[in-house]
Amino acid sequence: MPEMLSTALPLVAVDPTTASGDTAWLLAAAALVLIMAPGLAIFYGGMVRAKSVLNMMMMVFGALAVVMVVWILVGYSLAFGDDLGGGLVGDPTQYAAFKGMLEEVPGAPYPITLFATFQGLFAVITVGLIAGAIADRTRFGTWLVFAGLWTVVVYAPVAHWIFDFSAGDHVGGWMANELGALDFAGGTAVEINSGAAGLAAALVLGRRVGFGREPMKPHNLTLVMIGAGLLWFGWFGFNAGSALGATNTAAIVFVNTLLAGCTGLLAWLAVERFRDGHATSFGAASGVVAGLVAITPACGFVTPLGAMAVGVAAGAICAVAIGLKHKLRYDDSLDVVGVHLVGGLVGTILIGFLASSTVNGVDGLLYGGGADQLGKQLVAAGATLAYSFTATVLLVLLLEKTMGFRVDEDDEMAGVDLVIHAETAYDLHTTGGARLHFGPETGNLQS
């Protein structure tokens, strides 16, 4: 996010009309990010097998509920409170339960509670993304506990590192301030973070029964396409909303987000057509998401031409990367690693090449800025990946040993929808057709 956007809101006179417009935009952007949660649930729900649809959707909706409660209680304070030392984490008590944040601040460009809630919805999406890596085999209750703990242990610290800028007496995170890494809307905290965590969880819980032997294709591509459309729609709030105002930067980010989604789609389909002979609807949806993932960190630093390049790179690279799980034999159910980890790395690193000072004052390698920014991006990406992966391995192991994280094999084969939720997504029984009547001789029921 831009350096100007700190929790220490400037107490300077702001034109009331401008402040009102910025607040209105941030309210709308927060609502757009919120709709990404049901969009992700629909997207993931279409990608799993029919016996796991409801559980997959419930994991995302459950994350929405748990993460927002934890965020209000302590997560925001950990992410944006005054640094406790080393730029690693904020003071967990400073803003606990939004303490001291409810009164209007004279001269502030927007209410701090709105900014905090907007940021909390980023945490929701990040945790929801992890669910896709461990679909079909997860205990719902343990997942809810994981969602809350992971928000505190992993997401909030990483958000502090990269999103919390120092201002006045406020001291923020090490990546944003000491390192000087750039991440406009979450390539590190959201995409690399969720992808690394998804890989860790998938490795600890192990492969699904039948992985590599049985077909595990998406059961409903219509849902996948609808979900992708909702995600794309919401992503404008995710990225352009991170400008935190109705500004020229927000407009540029909006355009870049649109273009990267378009070129991500085209690049993924080109790879499919060349490799498999067909351009599929599933590939189109995946390509859009890959382009959006990669442009998330870069959207406020590259030109529209640069955004198209980011989308092309992500669409092509991610289309190839999703095949790694079969070669390396890890079961990332819904390609969280191949799309979000790889796409997040692509977008974060490409800032070092494609950033343009005409957009936000920083030039990348290809614009004459040298390799300095590229080095900073590599450090930020590597540190996020390493911390998220390690912490998630330990957390999943702890929960597996204490509560049990993976369902029993028989329950997995029967389907987690029926076993865990006592429901099925589709009622396939006959609802009409043959008429029933009693026979005249015996009174027996006949058709």
Image (tube, rainbow, N blue to C red):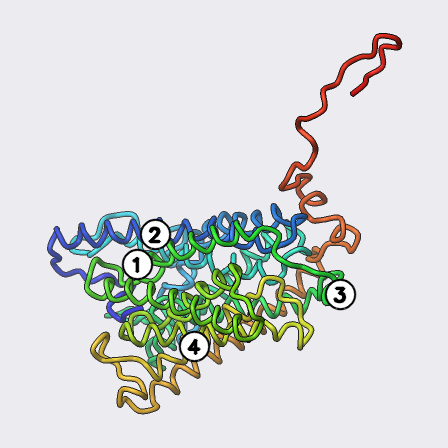
Asked if the residue at tag 1 contacts the one at tag 2, i.e. Cβ–Cβ closer than 8 Å, the answer is yes
Give the label, 2 or 3, closer to the camera: 3
The crowding category of the residue bearing disc 4, from other C-alpha atoms within 10 Å (few below 14, some 14 to 19, many at least 20), is: many
Compare residues 55 and 166 and report the one nearer the observer.
55
- Give the CA separation, mark 4 to mark 3: 31 Å
Q: Secondary structure at mark 2?
A: helix
Q: Earlier in the sequence, mark 3 or mark 1?
A: 3
Query: Residue type at mark 2?
Result: Ala
Residue at 61% over, 75% down: 324
Residue that badge 2 annotates? 30
- Say the numbered circle drawn on residue 202: none
Residue that badge 1 annotates? 241
The crowding category of the residue bearing disc 1, from other C-alpha atoms within 10 Å (few below 14, some 14 to 19, many at least 20), is: many
Q: Secondary structure at mark 3?
A: loop
- Give the CA separation, mark 2 to mark 1: 7 Å
Image position of 50 with respect to 307: above or below: above
- Give the CA separation, mark 1 to mark 4: 24 Å
- Give the CA separation, mark 2 to mark 3: 43 Å
Give the label, 3 or 1, closer to the camera: 3
- Give the CA separation, mark 3 to mark 1: 44 Å
